[in-house]
Image (cartoon, rainbow, N blue to C red):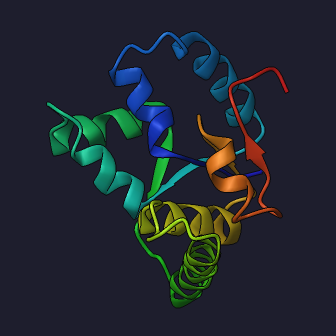
């Protein structure tokens, strides 16, 4: 079973978030069930973290046993586009104005849907509506 990781899972380690012990426990479980992967968008988001040099990021991923998947095929891009368009249409119809979620979230969700078996995130609610068939894993006791 392959688990995709959202950016917030890894950045929580670097920020010494209070959830780190729960994240660590959940990562042990999912790693025991299969591989860990991030898509190129997550890699790029992590690169923007303060003091995260390329060497630091590469070393962290290698030591944590996380694969970086930079090959986002046409299927992932098309899926992200469809999901983002549906979201934007819902947002406009509800008179909520312009889309507030970033396209990056839709690429991360589409990658997890098509190239992994599930997504580990600190914000499962963000993905639940737009990816109802994607198995979402949070750090709560589930």
- Which residue is located at x 77 percent, y 60 percent? 134
Direction from residue 126 to residue 44 in the image, left or right:
left
Q: Residue furthest front?
A: 95
- For image coordinates 64% across by 68% down, the residue present is 115
Q: Is residue 132 left or right of residue 13?
A: right
The quarter in which the C terminus is drawn is: top right
Q: Residue at x 74, y 23 (%)?
A: 140
Image-based side of 8 in relation to 4, left or right? left
Give x and y (percent) for residue 14. 33, 23
Instruction: Give the answer, above or below, for where 124 lies relative to 127.
Output: above
Q: Up-down: is 40 above or below 50?
A: below
Q: Position of residue 55 (x, y in %)?
A: 18, 40
Across and down, in percent, residue 98 comes to 44, 71
Point out residue 117 in the picture as x, y percentages from the top left corner.
75, 57
Using the image as rendered, state which of residue 91 and residue 5 is in the foreground.
91
- In-front residue for pair 118/93: 93
Which is more toward the observer, 101 or 51?
101
Q: Is residue 134 above or below residue 95?
A: above
Q: Residue at x 27, y 40 (%)?
A: 57
């Amino acid at each position: 079973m392959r688990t995709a990781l959202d950016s917030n899972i890894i950045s929580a380690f670097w920020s010494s978030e209070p959830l780190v012990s729960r994240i660590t426990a959940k990562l042990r479980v999912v790693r025991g069930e299969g591989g860990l992967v991030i898509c190129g968008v997550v890699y790029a988001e992590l690169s923007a973290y303060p003091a995260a040099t390329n060497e630091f990021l590469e070393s962290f991923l290698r030591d944590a046993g996380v694969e970086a998947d930079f090959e986002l095929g046409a299927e992932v891009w098309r899926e992200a586009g469809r999901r983002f368009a549906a979201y934007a249409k819902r947002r406009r119809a509800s008179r909520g104005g312009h889309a507030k979620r970033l396209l990056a979230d839709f690429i991360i969700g589409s990658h997890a849907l098509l190239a992994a078996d599930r997504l580990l995130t600190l914000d499962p609610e963000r993905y639940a509506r737009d990816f109802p068939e994607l198995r979402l894993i949070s750090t709560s006791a589930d």
